[in-house]
Image (tube, helix red, strand yellow):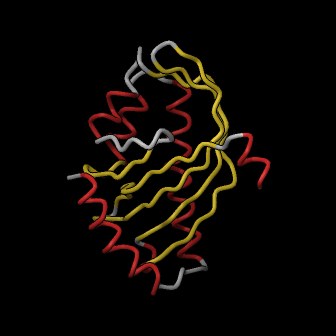
Amino acid sequence: MRKFLFAILLAVLLPGMAAAQAITGEKADQVKREIMKIEDEKLAGLLRGGSEPVDWIKQYDAEEVAQTNIDGSSPTKAEIEAGLQPGVFKMHSMKQDGHRFRVYDDGKVAVVTYHALGVLERNGKVTPRESNFSDVWVKQNGAWLRVLHAEREITKKSAAAQ
């Protein structure tokens, strides 16, 4: 069912995005500021821990968010929230940089890519991780919702190719 919904989302968004021109100027800059504020909230909450990462997901991820993890899994929003619970997940360090924005549909859709380097702990196992992320944000009723979140781990082999 999730793959079907994801296929529908892509079928609806991609043709419009392919034909659409990214907007620039003050409206695009405003979108970038709004989303970066949300990203800064996410990062601060991840580092503080507790319930903050789950609270962020509840507020900003769409109910049918399409997420792809580095292992290829596509969890539901409930599964994402469960994986970020205190005692299951802890972020030891995290730095995000290189945010690139493409803004479409008169400032109502944004595609954001960025790089992250950090150390996380999941179920007691501490792991350093370097990844590239892609997010699609849609503004509905004046609020930003993340509808797609995809992570690609940077391995030594892929880092050498860059």
Q: Residue at x 55, y 73 (%)?
A: 28
Residue found at the very far right of the displayed protein: 160
100 in relation to 131, above or below: below
106 in relation to 113, above or below: below
- In the visual, does 123 lie left or right of 119? left
Q: Residue at x 46, y 22 (%)?
A: 89
The quarter of the picture where residue 91 lies is top right
- In the visual, does 106 lie left or right of 48? left
The quarter of the picture where residue 23 lies is bottom right
Task: Tell me residue 95's x, y (percent).
Answer: 67, 38
- In the visual, does 35 lie left or right of 145? right
Q: Residue at x 73, y 44 (%)?
A: 157
Closest to the observer: 43 or 119?
119
Closest to the observer: 133 or 102?
133
Q: Residue at x 56, y 50 (%)?
A: 133
The quarter of the picture where residue 6 lies is bottom left
Task: Tell me residue 46's x, y (percent).
Answer: 51, 31
Task: Tell me residue 72's x, y (percent).
Answer: 44, 43
Residue found at the very far front of the displayed protein: 157
Task: Tell me residue 24's x, y (percent).
Answer: 59, 79
73 in relation to 1, above or below: above
- In the visual, does 4 lie left or right of 44? left
Check the picture and name the quadrant holding the C terminus.
bottom right
Total label count?
A: 0
